[in-house]
Amino acid sequence: MAAVLWVPGFCGTAGGEVFVLVNGGRVEGKLLNPDQLPRQDYLVRTPQGAEVTLTPDQVEDVIHRRPEEVQYESIRHGYPDTIEGQWELAEWCRQRHLLAARETHLRRIIELDPNHELARRALGYSRVGDRWMTQEERMLAEGYRRYKGRWRTSQEIELMERDQEKERAEGEWKQKLAMWRDWLGTDRHRLATENIEKIKDPNAIKALAYALEDESRDQARLMYVEALARIGTTGANRILAVWSMNDKVEEVRLTCLDYLKEKNDPESVPYFIGRLASDSNAEINRAAKALGYLENPSAVGPLIDALVTVHQYKVTTGNPGQTSATFSNAGPGGLSVGSSTKIVSRNAPNRDVLDALVSLTGGVNFSFDVGRWKAWYATQMTRPNLDTRRD
């Protein structure tokens, strides 16, 4: 082992340095030429007062020490190896933020007295029953593990790792689907369609949803819809429900509804019922058409509520662009614009809602008379084994 040039008693007003040598040795002392640039050598005064010259190729690293660290090395051997002496030195270190040195002396204290409470607590121990345990020991004993900077249960870690794996897989699907989409309409079109038609992995749902959003080609969107139907999870069915409302092409919308009806997905009906509350009259009717198609009688009550809805419209009166002079008894009034715009509220009878109600109730038809519909529905609700279809 290489020698270390250091003896107790070296102390200075400035911090010292530790020169880590390439051969594994260490030299401690004061650097006398700190401002030399470029570095040609290290002129070091050792604690004994001797001057040593080191070449840059001899030095692997230079560790700069604070004045408190140098002072600590000069005084630590003056404290007795007793509980009191070690505690006093630990406190000296705490006041000067020498945390590693403080821990060394606290650990020496509990070697001398395993039940020294102040030293134990300063080291992070707490008493559990008749034992002193660190936080780490206590958490491990309770089944926790340190994971990503926090203590977590095995179940939490498993869920996090599963989520990470899902996120990774979703990212891969997004890349693959983007590549196959680029192949559509090229000499690799057939391979792209074959790959898309094989998709069954639930991790592809998010990629398919993004593709539907960005895709302008109707046939391509139909392929993505079919892939979602093959996957068949609740998440995939929710995307089908959304696109049965949102797609601009009726064939795509109806294809989504066909798959939802085939799967009898329980989450679809509440989704469409929720869309009956839309501010858009067109969306209300589209949701009603979907509910009628799915043939679920639980939609009857919400459909009655949506039979006639109130919507706001802009109404312009007068002749746009025409101005005229106005007069009053007090004299000339000035110029006024020939048109005005205001917001009005109007009741909108929803034809597709009525059609869905008639279909779901087996032919009952009170037209747009909401009061009669509600009275009839109330009588149906009091019947045992409720069936809203007319006998």
Image (tube, rainbow, N blue to C red):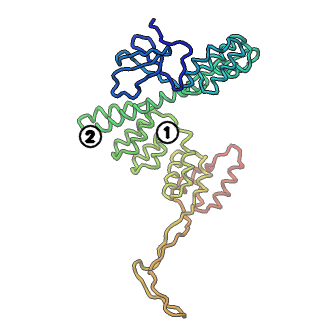
**Residue 138 placement (x, y as % from top left):** 67, 19
Residue 302 in view, yes or no: yes
**Residue 281 placement (x, y as % from top left):** 51, 59
Of the numbered discs in the image, which one, if any, rests on residue 161? none
Q: Residues within 10 Å of mark 2 (few under 14, many from 20)?
A: few
> Is label 1 in a helix, a strand or a loop?
helix
Which amino acid is tagged 1?
Asn
The quarter of the picture where the N terminus appears is top left
Q: Residues within 10 Å of mark 1 (few under 14, many from 20)?
A: many
Give yes or no for contact between labels 2 and 1 (Cβ–Cβ under 8 Å): no
Q: Residue at x 66, y 19 (%)?
A: 89
Q: Which residue is drawn at 41% across and 40% down?
A: 225
Relative horizontal placement of residue 164, taking residue 373 as reference (left or right):
left
> Is label 2 in a helix, a strand or a loop?
loop
Residue 142 in view, yes or no: no
Relative horizontal placement of residue 28, taking residue 35 as reference (left or right):
right
Q: In this view, does 240 lie above or below 301?
A: above
Q: Mark 1 points at which residue?
A: 237
In terms of image quadrants, where is residue 102?
Answer: top right
The residue lying toward the viewer, choosing from 274 and 62, is 62
**Residue 43 placement (x, y as % from top left):** 40, 20
Of the numbered discs in the image, which one, if any, rests on residue 185? 2
Q: Residue furthest right?
A: 130
